[in-house]
Image (cartoon, rainbow, N blue to C red):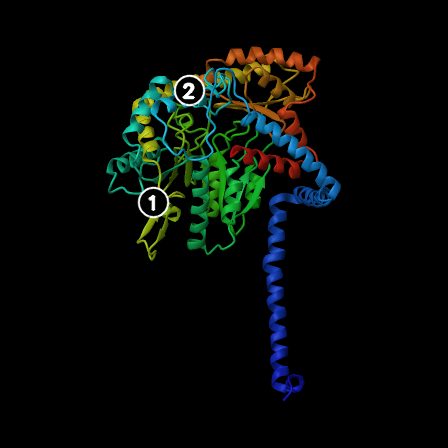
Amino acid sequence: MPVSDFLAGLSTDPRFVRFDRRFTQAAKVALAWYILKYVLLDGYRHLRARGLVGTAREAYNAVQGFVVGILLSLPSSRKKISSELAKTRQQIKDKLAPASYPDGVRLTVVKSLPEKGHDRAWLEEEWKGLKGLEKGDVNSGRVSGTVYHGGDELNAIINKAMSLFVVSNPLHPDVFPGVRKMESEIVSMCLNLFHCPEGAGTTTSGGTESILMACKTYRDWARSTKGITRPEMVIPDSAHAAFWKASQYFGIKLHVIPVDEVTRQADVRRMARAINANTMMIVGSAPNFPDGAIDPIPQLGALAKRHNIGLHVDCCLGSFIMPFLDRAGLNNGVPDFDFKVPGVTSISCDTHKYAFCPKGSSVIMYRSAELRRYQYYVITDWAGGVYASPSMAGSRPGSILAGAWAVLNYVGADGYIESCRNIVTASRHFAQEIKRRFPTDLYVLGDPRVSVVAFGSKTINIYALGDAMSSKGWHLSALGTGALHMAFTRLTAANVDQLLDDLEKVIEDVKQNPPKDGDMVALYGLGQTSVGPHVVGKLAETFLDVLYE
């Protein structure tokens, strides 16, 4: 029988007609249920989180971005952008990988593995040249954050500790039991410092990995205990960029809530409005990176407990300053921020910042060992045997753990109290002097209480001011909010008055002779235009490409 005749007969069969009708009705019900549950409900939650104004702004930005994207895809636009990017690439390369080196620096270009290994004398000469490429203002206290220097004596302790454990790997605790002991004690010291000796944690390679691990943990916890398959988290827009990275890496929907414009703190009321049945966690900072504000952790803790969700406190920047404010006599009403607050379920702390440990050391802490288990990765049926790792990495450098353990034991609480006192005193002095000396030209963002002070201006181009300070050897951080900030360290704390004096001179220079170009002006000025997100992203990719040339 021809297929056409078979189908024609089937279409008139009463049994098929009844089945077809039922199937159609079921499909309609399923479609309606899908639209109701996933489209309308998601739309309502999105609107509730952003509000009418925020939603309208998002829609406008999306339409604008779509139109700009089309315009930039035109052949003439692509040609012009390619030409400008080529020029920018060369400028970046001239700064990061110049064809010639400073006077007195001689280096060998090595592109392939040498056929015969070089001797120690050759290495010593190369090391000397490579070190000579560093900017001289790094150790003179002119860089915002970046160099969390504990002094030459402490560096010697670090070098000795790391040299003793240079080949060790915590992935093999049976082979390196000493490293296992040091790692567990690093975590234990931090848990005690943050008032949760009964808690649990692991070390990581830095603040970004600590935050990534926390987000992964809450995602898996929410799936296991609440059946949440479409997880969401709510963060203030002052949170660290690592939360955006975690959102992309782990498929977590992100609700970004504007902070209070005056205090620069997380807006608890607006964050509460964004919480729904899919929310797995909320976030607070102590302090945040952009302007040094400390979020209202007690209120966020109460909110987390009310909804039975996680509260992660990002204390990466606060690290070994926040816990010592009381003992340094500098609390001044700073509210509790750690595990003493009910509702706080995890905290990230960068030991390679204000604890002065070697770069590549951070700790992620949880209120309980049960919660920490959701961070682990375990595979039991791998051909190579059972594989288990506590964090992102498999093999890890035990030498860094040895260096960190040595530093924590060498400096001790008294040393950290003193460094906290020096750094915070300098930071607060800087904020007060900005208000006193430059009341018409500069203003301080929020109420900085710890190590970071951000400032903007209503009279001059703040990015031009940043470029002018760079020409004097100061490296301030440019913020996307139209401000600059200084993250004080032990090195910068000793030079705070010189920073203020140079700032005063530069303000007058910029007012009288506004510069027309400069790195900050070019990049952040572009970022504030409609084409900014498209072109600045390309510039960032170009920057990353040049790093490996």
Residue that appears at 50% across and 42% down: 282
Q: Quadrant of the N terminus?
A: bottom right
Q: Secondary structure at mark 2?
A: helix
Amino acid type at circle 2 is Lys
Residue neighbourhood size for the residue with mark 2, other residues' Cα within 10 Å, grouped as few (<14), some (14–19), many (≥20): some
How far across and down, in percent of the image, does residue 427 sit? 49, 19
Q: Which residue is mark 2?
A: 128
Q: How many marks?
A: 2
Nearest to the eye among marks 2 and 1: give it: 2
Q: Which residue is mark 1?
A: 369
Q: Nearer the viewer, residue 119 or 431?
A: 119
- Residue 477 placement: quadrant: top right
How far across and down, in percent of the image, does residue 535 sit? 66, 37
How far across and down, in percent of the image, does residue 112 sit? 45, 35
- Residue 338 placement: quadrant: top left
- The numbered mark, 2 or 1, whose residue comes first in the sequence reads 2
Q: Which mark is residue 17?
A: none
Residue 412 visible somewhere in the drawing: no
Q: Is residue 460 left or right of residue 316?
A: right
